[in-house]
Image (cartoon, rainbow, N blue to C red):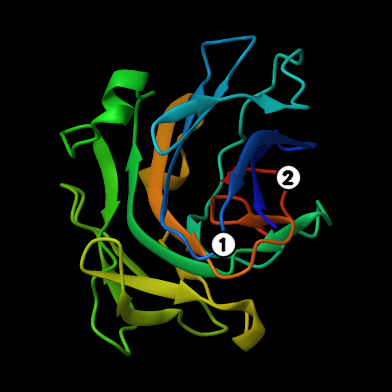
Amino acid sequence: SLAAVGTAFGTGTTVQAGESEFRLPYNKWTHIVVTFDGNNPEAKWGLYSDGKPGLIADIDYSSAMAKPYPSTLFQVGLPASQQNPDQRSFCGKVDELMLFNEVLDAETVAALTLDGASSLHLPLDEAPGATVFRDASASQQQLVCGVKGCPVSGMAGRLNRAVLFDPASGPTVLVLPNSASNRFTSSFSVEAWVKPRTVSGRQRIVATAGAKSNNGWAFG
């Protein structure tokens, strides 16, 4: 059994969701990159798994408003969407998450390196029991635990340490206070190493959209 990978975005009034051909293998590190190009009217989303590009189906780009409406949130590991009952909370490890304020091309994705375009870089290398998580980009922001608690920090990661999200123990979330990172709507890319512990259904990994929101975007 493998976990489906997809994307979603809210226009402010509706939610568009789609699924890719990719499936995340159980308990294995996989490098995922998702890109959004607001200037491309036919194929706004791009998705790469371990450097391999793939397609996302079932997204309607015909509307002039077919782009994420600005949100006040940025979350890593989050409650299941109440707008889309097929969307579940991610269960597994996340490591080395980065957000860029541009669309990465295939060559850059294949040999991804941190540069000046990175708006957010979460090494997620904090020690066990951490409640604040460092942003290593030039923005130097901090993420904090959501009101329901923290993911498990200090776990063995793909690179150094990682955090573990386990919905069975509660809807733990990392939250970035309102900033430029949650207001990208025209062109952006998100990447992370992920290692699922369960692979049933589509699981949300990163989003600016709330559980009841028609705004923002999400992937996973």
Give the residue type that dot 2 points to: Asn
Q: Is 154 or 49 nearer to us in this picture?
A: 49
Where is residue 145 drawn, in percent x and y?
44, 77
Instruction: Examine the rendered structure and indicate whether residue 4 appears above or below residue 55.
Output: below
Where is residue 121 drawn, in percent x and y?
26, 51
Q: Which residue is mark 1?
A: 26
Instruction: Examine the rendered structure and indicate whether residue 57 appears above or below residue 201.
Output: above
Where is residue 210 drawn, in percent x and y?
65, 57
**Separation of marks 1 and 2 at Cα, in angstroms:** 31 Å
Instruction: Examine the rendered structure and indicate whether residue 169 appears above or below residue 173.
Output: below
Res 172 → quadrant: bottom right
Where is residue 176 drawn, in percent x and y?
41, 61
Left or right position of 25 against 60: left
Q: Residue furthest front?
A: 1
Res 69 → quadrant: top right
Q: Is 152 or 68 nearer to us in this picture?
A: 152
Q: Which residue is mark 2?
A: 214
Q: Secondary structure at mark 2?
A: loop
Q: Earlier in the sequence, mark 1 or mark 2?
A: 1
Crowd band around label 1 with a 10 angstrom C-alpha radius: few (<14), some (14–19), many (20+): some
Label ID, residue 83 = none
Give the residue type that dot 1 points to: Tyr
Left or right position of 208 against 155: right
